[in-house]
Image (cartoon, helix red, strand yellow):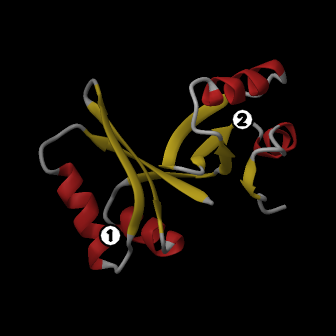
Amino acid sequence: MKQLTVLVPDETGIAARLTACLAAHGVNIEEIDIEGVEDRGIVVMSVDRYDEALRALSQEGFRVITQSTLLVRLEDRPGALAAVAARLRDEGIDLRSMHILRRDASGTTASLVCSDNARAAVVLRDVIAVEPPV
């Protein structure tokens, strides 16, 4: 799975501009998180048409960073995410982002971006939901 991170100015209407850009190009947003940090905004999302979204946002002048993610499936219980973070830390792997994508009766699915996704996939092989591309 790929994740798009868009760095935006923290200004009124930026979410409307960004989402309208994607809609105009027929891109469906599957997951989105929008946060303001001081005078900047950070938008993290996954979409159904990755290449088209990247092209559309870039043409619109947005600064887009792409990252591959790991999908993990965990028990939905206190400490499950902490255990994953500790396993990565113990192997010297930096956990750069973690997003809960879905929670249901069968567990929690989370998206991770690590400093070394290939090594992280080996460390977390027992909870990887989808094998990352080689």
The residue to which callout 2 is attached is: 115
74 or 130: nearer the viewer: 74
Q: What is the x, y in percent for residue 10? A: 22, 37
The residue to which callout 1 is attached is: 22
CA separation in Å, label 1 and label 2: 28 Å
Residue 25, relative to residue 115: is it above or below?
A: below
- Relative placement, left or right, of 75 versus 127 is left
Residue 8, relative to residue 96: is it above or below?
A: below
Q: Sort mark 1 into few (<14), some (14-19) or many (20+) by Cα contacts within 10 Å.
A: many
- Residue drawn at point x = 59 percent, y = 46 percent: 107
- Residue drawn at point x = 27 percent, y = 68 percent: 21
120 or 36: nearer the viewer: 120
Residue 76, relative to residue 92: is it above or below?
A: below
| Quadrant in the picture for residue 33 | top left
- Residue drawn at point x = 23 percent, y = 67 percent: 20
Circle on res. 102: none
Callout 2, which amino acid?
Ser
- Relative placement, left or right, of 77 versus 39 is right
Callout 1, which amino acid?
Leu
Q: What is the x, y in percent for residue 90? A: 81, 19
From this viewpoint, which residue is outermost toward the left?
A: 12
Q: What is the x, y in percent for residue 82? A: 63, 23
> Disc 1 or 2, which lies upstream in sequence?
1
- Relative placement, left or right, of 20 versus 98 is left
133 or 10: nearer the viewer: 133
Quadrant of the image containing the C terminus = bottom right
Q: Secondary structure at mark 1?
A: helix
Quadrant of the image containing the N terminus = bottom right
- How many discs appear? 2
From this viewpoint, which residue is outermost toward the bottom?
A: 26
Q: Sort mark 2 into few (<14), some (14-19) or many (20+) by Cα contacts within 10 Å.
A: some
- Residue drawn at point x = 77 percent, y = 39 percent: 116
